[in-house]
Amino acid sequence: MMSESNRRQVLGGGAAILTAASLGGAAFAKARPWRVGVIGCGWYGVLNLHALAQIAPVETVALCDVDRRMLEGARQQAMAFPDAMARPARRPELYRDFRAMLAKHHFDIVIVATPDHWHALPAIAAVNAGAHVYLEKPVTVDIVEGRAVLAAARANNRVVQCGTQRRNSACHIEARERVVKAGLLGKIGYVEVFGYYHQRPAQFPPPSPPPEWLDWEFYCGPAPLVPYNAAIHPRQWRAFREFCNGYVGDLGVHFIDTCRWMLDLGAPKRVASVGGVYVDKASAATTPDTQTAQFEFGDVLMSWGNREWGAIPADAGGWGAILYGDKGTLKLGSVSYEFTPLGGGAAMSGNDDAESRKFPHDQELRNDIQGMALTRPNMRDFVAAIEAGQRPASDIEEVYISTSCCILANLAMDLGRPVRWDGKAVIGDEAAEKRLARPYRAPWTHPADVA
């Protein structure tokens, strides 16, 4: 894997100012625009495409989604991205089935930003078709799927960059180098990861027939065919375990991955978790509204905590991580950090405001500004890794490990007992080992069965 210094040298050495406004586009060697396809054209599918178009010349060849209205809206946005490095020459073609899209076109890059239960099959199909893939987090819903995506990426020699952006966030890189690697925290024994945002309503409407513009059968895909609920799509599917790894796999995976990277942690040796629907008992949601988890990394203990009810702690910022050392404390926010030494001394802080100011038109977009500021550096690293023939910072292997932490937490919660893990298999628990691959609904076939 490319070292941190070499990776930054590629990014720094390749960077060039190509606009009068110094908008942060990068100079890449590729002579023609990158041919791009998007599978999953909701909020983050469009955001990822926009961020890529801002830093590299892009030709959006095709878009795919099971929601016709979302698909048409994504095409309109793709034709009018402000600050894009290349103006579109033609409208992208639209598809409902990713297999048809991949069969008809050649892509340099495919963005996969579907709900979690649809990550594995499109990502594997895209790399098998020769594309490099930008895959949203968490990489998969089950661990065996993650192994299959990793194996496909390596077998095809394709770059797969994942959407845990903080390995490329300027302020988090600064915190890692100036605080953690500089030894200012001293001995680090405990890391607290938390997510207290309330991400779902307490009540959902009753089931109803799906709208004519949404292919609900295809939406559910390999997941169980649950009754359609108007609140699930497009933003509340994480409230249903049928489609995801819950909130630990949404908010949690970001900072589990960040802290693993900062502390050079591998896979946890033991994972425990408890949780359930403790408060919103009348809700149709199947994701716990309350959960805690513990991950044992040798002599570092990491915890995760979230709840979908009650007050958000004022000093927690709603979402982030805190690294506790015997010499100081480091708080990590979405786009910021704060270091406080014990016993006096100079505090330190930083943020990603500079990246947020590079593209003034971001302020006009419905996409969130923080997401754009975090995703652009991740896209720069992604494209640079493709051109250099190197692995990116948020490489599929690293984020597979971070995703596995979340999956193991849910597994331990479901089984009601801790799970011991050697990085590849469950130790001494046959029932847990059998749950590393979820059942697929016909006619879809799990990657493990294909292998």
Image (spheres, rainbow, N blue to C red):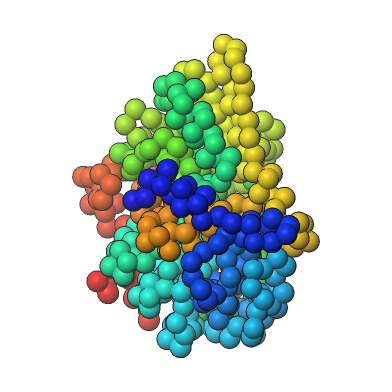
Q: Residue at x 69, y 55 (%)?
A: 22
Residue furthest to the left: 428
Horizontal and vertical percent for residue 312?
A: 67, 38
Quadrant assignment, res 391: bottom left
| Front position in the image: 451 or 181 | 181
Horizontal and vertical percent for residue 33?
A: 55, 75
Q: Residue at x 44, y 20 (%)?
A: 186
Question: On screen, 33 above or below 188?
Answer: below
| Front position in the image: 119 or 346 | 346
Q: Left of 441 or right of it: where is 283?
A: right
Quadrant of image for the C terminus: bottom left
Question: On screen, 165 above or below 232?
Answer: above
| Front position in the image: 289 or 343 | 343
Q: Residue at x 38, y 38 (%)?
A: 264
Question: On screen, 101 above or below 363?
Answer: below
Residue furthest to the right: 364
Horizontal and vertical percent for residue 286?
A: 53, 57
| Front position in the image: 181 or 405 | 181
Q: Residue 49, can we see it?
A: no
Residue furthest to the top: 343
Q: Residue at x 53, y 59 (%)?
A: 379
Quadrant assignment, res 294: top left
Horizontal and vertical percent for residue 18?
A: 64, 61
* Marker count (numbered): 0
Q: Residue 311, can we see it?
A: yes
